[in-house]
Image (tube, helix red, strand yellow):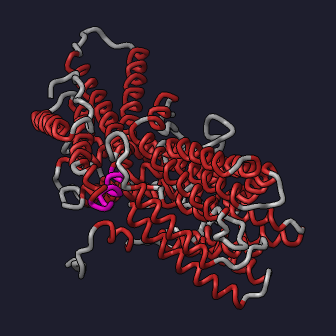
Amino acid sequence: MSRRPLLDLPPWLAHALRAQRGPVPWSAVVRGALAAGPLLLAALVLGRVSLGVVAAIAAMLAGINDRPGSRRASVKRIGVPALAGAVGLCAGTYAGQYTGPVPLTLLLTVLGLLAGGVSAVGPVASSAGTQVLVAAAVGAGMPLPESGWQRGLAFLAGAGWLLTLRLALPTPGSAGGDFRFDGERAAVARVYDAIADLLAAAGSAHAEDRRAALTAALDQAQDALTGPRLRRYASSAAERRLHAQYAAALPLAEAATALAWAGEAVSPRAAAGPRRLAAAVRAQSPTGPLPAPDRSAPALRALDDALLHAAETFDRGDGRRDLHTRRRTARQLLTAVFGRGGREYGLRVALCFGAGVAAAQALHHARWYGQHTHWYWLPATVVFLVKPDLGPLASRVLCRAAGTVLGALVFAGFAAVLPRPEGLVVLVAVCGALVPIATRHFAAQTAVVTVLVLALVMVGGEPQASVGRIGETLLACAIVLVVGHLPLPGQRGGGVRQRLTEAASAAYAYLTHVLGEAEAEAEAVPVATPVTEAQAKAGDTAGAGDRALRWTLRREAYRALAEARTAIALSAAELPALARHTAGTDEVAALLERLVDTTTACAVHLDDTGRLTPRHTRHLGELLARLEEVGERLGPTVPAVPPLPVAA
């Protein structure tokens, strides 16, 4: 029996108290300990303390982006924001040196507008937007003897050092195999485990959650296997095998989704096959014997066929290596940047960042800082507070304020007793090791980062400034709270609505493709003439191409829906004044998920029989009618249902 919470907290407060759970990422802890602290120590030995401070800050920011996943994915996740940060540091340095307070404020405000719009593209772009603004504030507000290009190189060196550790050091448990692909191997194995979990939950109340978990596992595996490479295709046998094993999981996932959609429990042995495949991926071994097939229904026949195909792929060690991803076109990227979400977010970031820079400049020139000449803290804090991917606005403000106060008080205590500079270097190394653990909660991350940055700037020659940092943080919280609630041109909730529109478009594209296959099957006329071997092979090739496109569209639809769901959940946890602007969008997302699930069930049934049952067409018709009704009520949130090849 589940325990009920003692207090029914409002969503914005419950989110602030919620923390992620999971095992300690020991490999990331080791990398964090070997990053900022050793860089600062090397700079002290070489007599280039200021450059060491910049490199350590870059390593700290790279450590925040050092999340679990494959090495290939980490190159983009860490490297792209680092490049953006180096550019921002150079731009901020030269702008601070050669412009006055007013032009500097205007330039950084424009930079905030651009960075905010680009952040709407995706997680990596959002991290890059964050780092370019934080680094620009540091470059303009942290006076150092080096020129802008020297600071930029030091920043790249610091982030590059942590990325080198990420690529070179093996993770725990990978010493027995090819540790280069341990992240990819674990991600692919989780896909097969998620398929087994969904099959075990078919016909129960947990099926919807297990299907969402399968979507997340497939998204993570795609991200783990895609990334920057020197060659167009996988260049090693181990990587090609992983690509083939991932591709073999897609028909299994499709069949499992169709079985879950049917709402009937399946035999426990149905989940045994994917479990064995998951174990084979982890152990890099053949699959061994699989459970006997059960071919009593179209979805079960599809499951058995997919299982046999996967076993053949595993034993052969090669096969289809299509990851079923498509690059976003330039038009799609521009739409994300300049669309509703990009415009709203860019304008809000520009206003917050510009107000933070202006307030910091005013306090700096009024000598509120006293002997402290570093004024970067306030605008840098604003950047983290205005980021919606770090949580709802109220939650971010509460966590940032609490974390800064705690971190400043802790540092004040350490600064009073630790020897300088050796004690501060050790403190930086310890904080670097704690960053991967602290990222589970924004307040904890803020506290650790506050201690680390205060230690760095004290090593660089700035006096103890805990009280000033608390005051600047509280001022930044006030700025973001005010600007976050200001009425702006256009409709609020643009980011949520843009992602929901993208999800609806992807779902309709998937549905149109599947029903197009149904129309082609219905119009096919049997031919009495014998089919040659070449014609049969050509037909098989065409069918494989159609199925590959179908899986690509299916992956795009589910991924877009998952991103929309995340944005909707964050918006729902805002204060009521903000949450009301996206009310009802969760209903649209739920309908679209049911539509994609139903489309998947239709695709599996079409593969087996070539026609749809009345149950399939009835469900499609009901869902499309319901989406039209909700779309009329909510306005332009949901695109109009397109004309379909087959009447639903």
Q: Is residue 331 left or right of residue 592?
A: right
* Residue displayed at 70% across by 89% down: 416
Q: Is residue 100 above or below residue 535?
A: below
Q: Residue furthest bottom?
A: 417
Q: Position of residue 49 (x, y in %)?
A: 82, 68
Q: Position of residue 605 (x, y in %)?
A: 22, 36
> In the image, is residue 457 part of the stretch drawn in magenta?
no
Q: Which residue is more in the foreground, 510 or 96?
A: 96
Q: Residue furthest front?
A: 366
Q: Is residue 318 left or right of residue 494?
A: right
Q: Is residue 203 above or below residue 174?
A: above
Q: Which residue is more in the foreground, 384 or 280?
A: 384
Residue 53: quarter of image: bottom right
Q: Which residue is more in the foreground, 408 or 280?
A: 408
Q: Residue furthest right?
A: 46
**Viewport quadrant of the C terminus:** top left
Instruction: Using the rendered image of the protein, determine whether residue 315 is visible from the camera's viewpoint.
Output: no
Q: Which residue is more in the foreground, 433 or 405?
A: 405
Q: Is residue 85 left or right of residue 41?
A: left
Residue 458: quarter of image: bottom right
By secondary structure, the bulk of the magenta-drawn segment is best described as: helix
* Residue displayed at 28% across by 27% down: 512
Q: Is residue 643 left or right of residue 532?
A: left
Q: How many marks?
A: 0
* Residue displayed at 64% across by 84% down: 412
Magenta residue span: 565-576
* Residue displayed at 14% across by 37% down: 629
Q: Position of residue 568 (x, y in %)?
A: 32, 52
Q: Position of residue 189 (x, y in %)?
A: 46, 56
Q: Is residue 33 above or below residue 252?
A: below
